[in-house]
Structure formats: structure tokens, C-alpha cells
Amino acid sequence: MVNKTIAKIVLLCFCLFFYSCTSNKQELKGIWSEEFETNSKNRDDTKIITGEASNLSELNLESWDARICLAYDELTLYFHSDRSGGKGNYDIWVSTRKSTTDEWEEPTNVGSPINTQYEDFGVFISQDNLVLYFCSDRPGGYGLYDIWYSTRKNVSENWSEPINLGSVINSEYNEIGPSLSPNGLEFYFSDYRTFIPRPGGFGQADIWVSTRESIESSWREPKNIGSKVNSKWEDYGLTLSRDGLFLFFTSKRGDNQWNEDIWFSSRDSLLSEWKSPKRFNQTINSDSNDKAGWISKDRKVFYYSSDRNNGKGSIDLWRIVLDKPLEY
């Protein structure tokens, strides 16, 4: 009798959830619609690139090492990791090098107050090296993961106590993948897989942008960047190139939704619309999970994360030196 009662309760909960999902088709814009599903075999959406890929073994351990961000001078590299020696489940780590031709030195933990006993990850540093944006599930947020930022007056100072970016950008949902345009007037981020995605999106995770009038102005209500870039699948974990003209992100769209691939979009100027995304060929995207990375300022070196073979941990940092600068 008890088992039957439990079974009825489970069935009722499932029916209520299914009804709530299907009754919100208009609000969730395309999550359940087939119109955003495309067959990439029939489209020219693959970017053929050539180059030599290598594992950044000097940075990787037997851990999850992901999400590279380089400082503007490209002599400092940030990433997040769940390796031992940190303060929480995920911490932000940093490595330096003396020149762009030198190898990266052994990474160190960024430390307090950036890293906590909670998850701190997904870092982006401003062009002047004075503002550090990152994601965290620490107390004081609006959702499971929020975007926070810390400042310093000069590069020799310690980072200030992090501040939540606020309820205009952060919500009861998940916000990750912060990126700032070179003029400081566009702030890109993505929501992330939750029980219910952020309303107003096209898929299970979308890319969003907020704008402001000036550096001193407040951020406006974020807008979805649209179905030309976002799909009915998961599009998240973005990074914006230093010139603001390339947008890299992770997605499960395309022929094989089992694995994640790296896609990118481009625009002609900061005032132009984003073009239809392209997926890297197998020089970068493999049969494993490949996650969006970072392009050097000369567009000749691309950094990314992958769980492909011949790595050291569950996810490793990789680098590919392209045979020619990346173009759309």
C-alpha cells in the first residue's frame, strides 16, 4: 500500500513538471521547438584550421584544470582547478612567464579573498589588470552560481574583498563565463544547465550580454544575443577575444550531442552583429569533450580544455599553435 502511494505521488509530480514545462513554451522560446535544430552536415559551419596541439603539462595535474584567461600582456595566465592545495572544491590559480616565448611557471593559488571554501572558477581579468571577474557559489549571491568581481589600484596590490555583480545580471538561475569587451561597455556571460534555464533563452544554456553608457554607468538588463548564435542546445562557457571581435563558446549542437565542441562567432566591429557560429574541425575538436578557450592577441595561439587522451587529469589545459592567424 505504501509503495503504491509513493508511486502515485511520483507520477503526479512528473505530470505537474511536464505540464509546467510545456505550458511555458512561449516564455522559454524554443527549448521544445524543433525550429532551432539544424543538421550541420548540410551547412558550411566547420572551420578548417591546421596547427600543432600540445598538452600544457607544466600547468596540468591529475585534476580538473580548465578555463584559461590571459592578461593583456600575455605574461600572466589564470585558470581554475580542483587540485589539492586549494581552499574549496574549485579554486582560481595563476601562472606567469617572463616572455611570450618562455614556458609557463608552476602555478600558484590566487588565495584569499578570491578563493574560499566554496567553488570559485571561470575567471576573466580586465585589460588593465585591475578588475577580476569570476563565478562562485559563496553565500551572498542570488542563485546557485553568481558572477563576482574584485579590484585593485595597481598590479602590485592585493585583490579587494569580492563584490557580487548585482541583481541586474545575477539571478535565481546560474550565471557563469564572464567576459568584458575592450571598451568596457559590453559584459557577456552565459546561464548554465539548471532544472529550468533562465527565461527568455532559446536552449538549455544561452549566451547573454549587458551594456552600459560609460565605465561609470550601471549595467542594463541583459539581453539574449539571439538565435543566430544560441541554439536549442547548451551554449555556454564563453570567452571574448581581447579585441572583442571573436566569441568562443562550448556547445553540444551539431552531429553528435554526446560530446561538447568548441564553436566561435565573429563580428566586423564592436558595433556589428555577431555572425553565424562555426565549429572547429578535428584539429581542435575531438571525439572527447572540448571546452572553449582563449585566443592570443595575434590570433596564432589558441588555448582550450579537453578530456581527450594523453592528458594528465580529468580535464587538461591544451594549446595549439595555428599555422596562420585565425580568421572567420
Image (spheres, rainbow, N blue to C red):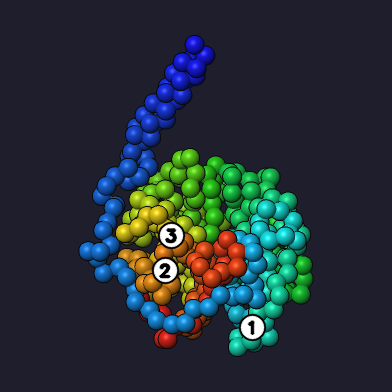
Task: Name the residue: 36% across, 60% down.
Answer: 229
Q: CA gap, disc 3 to disc 1?
A: 28 Å
Question: Going by the image, does 242 lie left or right of 29?
Answer: right
Q: How crowded is mark 2: few (under 14 residues within 10 Å), some or many (20 or more)?
A: some
> Circle 3 is placed at which residue position?
260
- Point out the tag, 2 or 1, that comes first from the N-terminus: 1
Give the crowd class for mark 3: few <14, some 14-19, many >=20 residues within 10 Å: many
Q: Which of marks 3 and 2 is nearer the N terminus?
A: 3
Look at mark 1 in the image and give the residue it sits on: 103
Mark 2 and mark 1 residues within 8 Å of each other at the beta carbon: no
Could you tell me which residue is drawn at 63 percent across and 70 percent down? Answer: 60
In the picture of the structure, the residue carrying the numbered disc 2 is 285
Could you tell whether 57 is left or right of 271 in the image?
right
Question: Which residue sits at x=41%, y=64%?
Answer: 287
The image shows residue 114, relative to residue 1, as above or below, that is below
Q: What residue appears at the point 42 percent right and 58 percent down from the top-left corner?
A: 259
Observer-nearest of 139 and 41: 41
Q: Residue 11 carries which label?
A: none
**Distance Cα–Cα, label 3 vs label 2:** 8 Å
Q: Where is residue 217 in the image (x, y as percent from the top left)?
A: 56, 60
